[in-house]
Image (cartoon, coloured by chain):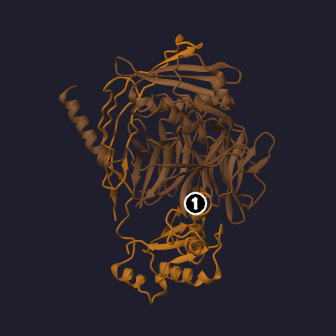
Amino acid sequence: MNMIQRVFLVLAVLSLGGCADLKELTGTSDAPIEDHGASTAAAQGTAGTNGSQGVETAALPAAGSGDVRAMAANQQNAESQSGRSSVVGVSTAQAAMLKDPNNPLSKRVIYFDFDSDAIKDEFRGLIEAHAGFLKRNSAARIILQGHTDERGSRDYNLALGQRRAESVKQALVLMGVQNDQVETVSLGEEKPVAEGHDESAWKQNRRDEIHYLGE
Amino acid sequence: MSFFFRLLAAACAFLAAALPGHVQAGMTIEIVGAAANRIPVVIAPFLPAGASGDDPAEIIRADLSRSGLFKMVDGNGLGKPGEAQSVDYGQWRDRAADALVVGQVSHAADGRLDIRFRLYDVVRKTQLAGFSYLVPPTMNRSIAHKIADLVHEKLIGEPGNFSGRVAYILKHNGRYELQVADSDGVNAFTVVRSPEPIISPVWSPNGSKLAYVSFEQKKPVVYVQSLTDGRRKAVANFRGSNYSPAWSPDGSKLAISLSKDDIAQIYLIGADGGDARRLSKSGALETEPAFSPDGRWLYFTSDRGGSPQIYRMPVDGGEAKRMTFEGAYNVSPAISPDGKYLAYVRRDGGSFHVAVQDLENGQTQVLTDTQFDESPSFAPNSRNILYATMVNGRGVLATVSVDGRVKQRLTISGDLREPAWAP
């Protein structure tokens, strides 16, 4: 599916301001003896943007001197995600089968220990089931999404999520799945499934999710 | 003003109502620790009793007390001393004040404000500073912050951070906003709003741009946005994850983390995008680059030794040296603008604390007692560290001085995270 994201940016900057004069006051009487002539300026202004993707950006109220100084309108070009050929992915019938709760392939989540990408024995069966399906269906593609709990560094958690995704990918490849059937991404700690701030929430959030393309 | 300009101005005003812009919600700042010996000062009112408008004296008092380094001495009953009068030092000494600020605000003929102040050393009976600022009325608050910076500098020996700005992410109502506010939380302004997460805002060295990571394309992509015109560009959108931006001190490059060749490695790209040059070459997780202020070193987090620790390597290539040793989880390096300190987050048992290492002698001190600290960022004067933590299950911002003595907490309705102090 080709997904086009269009972010329109309509920008208008209005800045109003004036110069500021700075004088040093010395002695105990009101007798300024030095004029620094430093100038800073304040401005009132606003900028707005809008986008069909729901992302909006704006400028800060501009700093500068002068009266009505700058106005601009601008369109940000559309950005697109890479499109995929329609020959890969699962069929509608397969998609229904993959989601059938009685089917082992409906189990899609692999959980991890803190700061670990080691696959626990209890998830071997789940991974083997998906490996079997991917091997039988060479057009099937999955995205492995790595996630972490909220603790520690967001950036390190993005790296750790990537490694969790790679860890399961390596297991699948060792089981005979083709490299290009599996794409790995990390969302770090940004997309928790449980919102709490204790171990019962964290253990649900340290996970890999398997998503089939086209389902 | 032409009709065209007036029309655009009206469009601006309309857009401002619905789109990113000034934020209503107020931020609350709470002081949770103070220096042992605070300097007693009187900030006399700048406006006569009953006058309307913001009195700069109130803003200066709030700034100075928030720093935890000053004790506000009550000048009540002594009236509003004239800015140009000779000072009766005895009456202020009787109130146990060491320093006195007097000032006034008057209206110039052209509509600008004339804000004047003088700072006196009450013990030595001398004037330490005196300035007159002729400014548009909109600059009332910023001049008050400048005066507070100067009072801090004259009495402490280094400038204050009161004129500074901070960037941070606010999550509320399921949306993510990148906001910029004055360091007292006033004048919060939304520069990006998105239904998907935004993380890692970092200021360009001249403060005119922000780099940040947005998940709007369902994966992390690094953007650079101008704060003067609001335009932005995806500067790193390679296959896989793109995150952890850090500006080079000259503003020409960004160090970032990419997963395009390996799980997580550090690369250099131009500040407006282009090809990525790989800097780290290990099979480990390497992320969170941070330049030293002289641009020679890159500090970063790596788990090449089996647990995440902070290392540094020469930007031009060469061996990396491990910087942290205590504990099994040391992440998120930040280098003070004066190059003397390395702040980072360290895990102790189930808690994550901000720690600081003196880069000259290697001594390390844990500064905080909050439980889930993240994202330390230095103030421009290298004296305070701004970081994110959690209080009662909600994200708040907090500051701590590098000696660990002075602590503040900034809260707002919604989750605050990922703070960055403007240069």
Under tag 1, what secondary structure?
Answer: strand
- Residue at x 59%, y 42% (from the top left corner): B66
Query: Exactly how many numbered labels are in the figure?
Result: 1
Residue furthest front in the image: B77
> Relative to residue B345, is residue A116 depicted above or below?
below
Q: Position of residue B88 (x, y in %)?
A: 62, 20
Residue for badge 1: B391
Q: Position of residue B151 (x, y in %)?
A: 61, 29
Residue furthest bottom in the image: A102
- Residue at x 52%, y 83% (from the top left corner): A129
- Residue at x 43%, y 52% (from the top left corner): B177
Residue situated in front as seen by the camera: B404 or B341: B404
Q: Position of residue A189 (x, y in %)?
A: 54, 63
Report which colour depicts chain A.
orange
| Structural crowding at the residue carrying mark 1, measured as other residues with C-alpha within 10 Å and reported as few (<14), some (14–19) or many (≥20) | few
Position of A66 with respect to A113 (left or right) is: left
Q: In the rendered image, which quarter contains the C terminus of chain B?
A: top right
Q: Toward which corner of the image does residue B385 lie, by quadrant?
A: top right
